[in-house]
Image: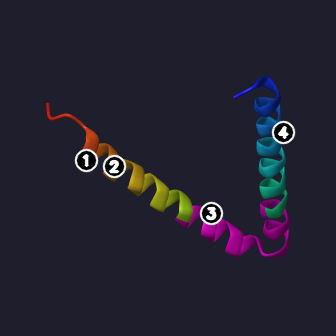
Amino acid sequence: MTPLGRTIGKKATKATVRHSVRGVVSKAQRKPLRSATLLSLGGAFGAMAGWLAGRKTAKPA
């Protein structure tokens, strides 16, 4: 990737992250309980999926 392409990619990534964070904050202000519940469930499922994936790829002792 050229330096120009890399710069454009970084800017696009930064803009996407800002947009996502802004949307999450906006929804959290409108419906805080629902947002907290969904974020908690997402974190729990993500942790469980990571743990299961780690177990499957781990080498036996």
Query: Residues under labels 1 and 4: Cα distance?
Result: 36 Å
The residue wearing badge 4 is 11
Mark 2 and mark 1: Cα distance apart in space: 5 Å
Q: Which of 31/58 is in front?
A: 58
Q: Amino acid at mark 1?
A: Lys
Left or right: where 10 falls relative to 43: right
What is the quadrant of residue 34 in the picture?
Answer: bottom right
Q: Nearer the viewer, mark 1 or mark 3?
A: 1
Tell me: residue 21, above or below residue 6.
Answer: below
> Range of the magenta residues?
24-41
> Label 2, on which residue?
53
Task: Write down the residue under mark 1.
Answer: 56
Question: Horizontal and vertical percent for residue 50?
Answer: 41, 49
Q: Is residue 30 left or right of residue 2?
A: right
Relative image position of residue 22 (x, y in whole percent): 85, 57
Determine crowd level at label 1: few under 14, some 14-19, many 20+ residues with C-alpha closer than 10 A: few
User: In the rendered image, which quarter contains the C terminus?
Assistant: top left
Q: CA distance from mark 2 to mark 4?
A: 32 Å
Residue beneath label 3, please? 39
Where's residue 35, x and y in %?
A: 70, 69
At label 3, the amino acid type is Leu
> Nearer the N terminus, badge 1 or badge 4?
4
Alpha carbon of mark 4 to alpha carbon of mark 3: how far? 26 Å
Residue contact at pointers 4 and 3, CB within 8 angstroms:
no
Residue at image coords 78%, 33%: 5
Q: Are marks 2 and 1 in contact (CB under 8 Å)?
A: yes
Where's residue 42, x and y in %?
A: 55, 63
How would you rate the neighbour count of disc 2 (Cα within 10 Å): few for under 14, some for 14-19, many for 20 or more? few
Question: In the structure shown, which secondary structural element does the residue marked by tag 1 occupy?
Answer: helix
